Amino acid sequence: MTGNVPCERGGRGVSWWQIPYPMKNSIVTLVRPALLALGCVLAAVSLSAADKPLPPLPLQATFETSAPGDHGGPFCVKLTNTSERTLKVAALVRYSVVTHPSAKSKTVPAQKIAPGKMLTIDDLAVEDKVTLTADGFEPLVLKVPPGKE
């Protein structure tokens, strides 16, 4: 065999290198522009969604002293809902001082805060970071101020 592929009907076939380039890659030729168009559409959609910044989380935070908790933190943060609707807020507390047997952070499960009501997160120490999240709002990051001694 000298590179010729026999046809199904018999006789001499056509070599693979004799087939014109577009026919070899006809599927690729058809699919490539469709994938390019799809990529452009997805990029446009993601950019338009990124153009709309999320509103800030409508919570007012005040830091106060409290009884030390399990972690030994003498402070608490009181969060008041300043919006007109109930918010479902979750929190992540990252401790500033960590010892080997203790956890580096604590997760506060999502809780509903009615308008004008308050949520208290206690057992905080100086420089601890509290990250608050709620659907449809920018996350709010709070840090216990060092002047709270």
Image (cartoon, grey):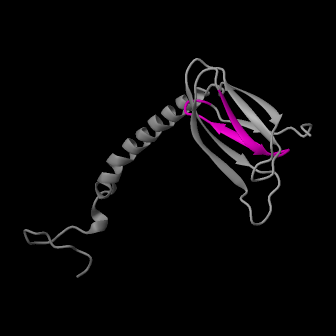
Please say if 71 is above or below 83. Answer: below
Choose between 71 and 2: the one closer to the eye: 71
What span is colored magenta in the figure?
118-137
Choose between 15 and 29: the one closer to the eye: 29
In the rendered image, the quadrant that contains the C terminus is: top right
Residue in the picture at 26% in, 76% down:
3
In the rendered image, the quadrant that contains the N terminus is: bottom left
In the displayed structure, does residue 75 sit left or right of residue 87? right
**Residue 139, percent across and down?**
65, 35
**Residue 43, percent across and down?**
51, 37
In the displayed structure, does residue 73 sit left or right of residue 79? right
> For residue 120, what is the image quadrant?
top right
**Residue 59, percent across and down?**
68, 26
Please say if 139 is above or below 80. Answer: below
Figure disc tally: 0
Residue in the picture at 27% in, 61% down:
19
In the displayed structure, does residue 21 sit left or right of residue 63? left
Residue in the picture at 64% in, 32% down:
138
Residue closest to the far front: 67
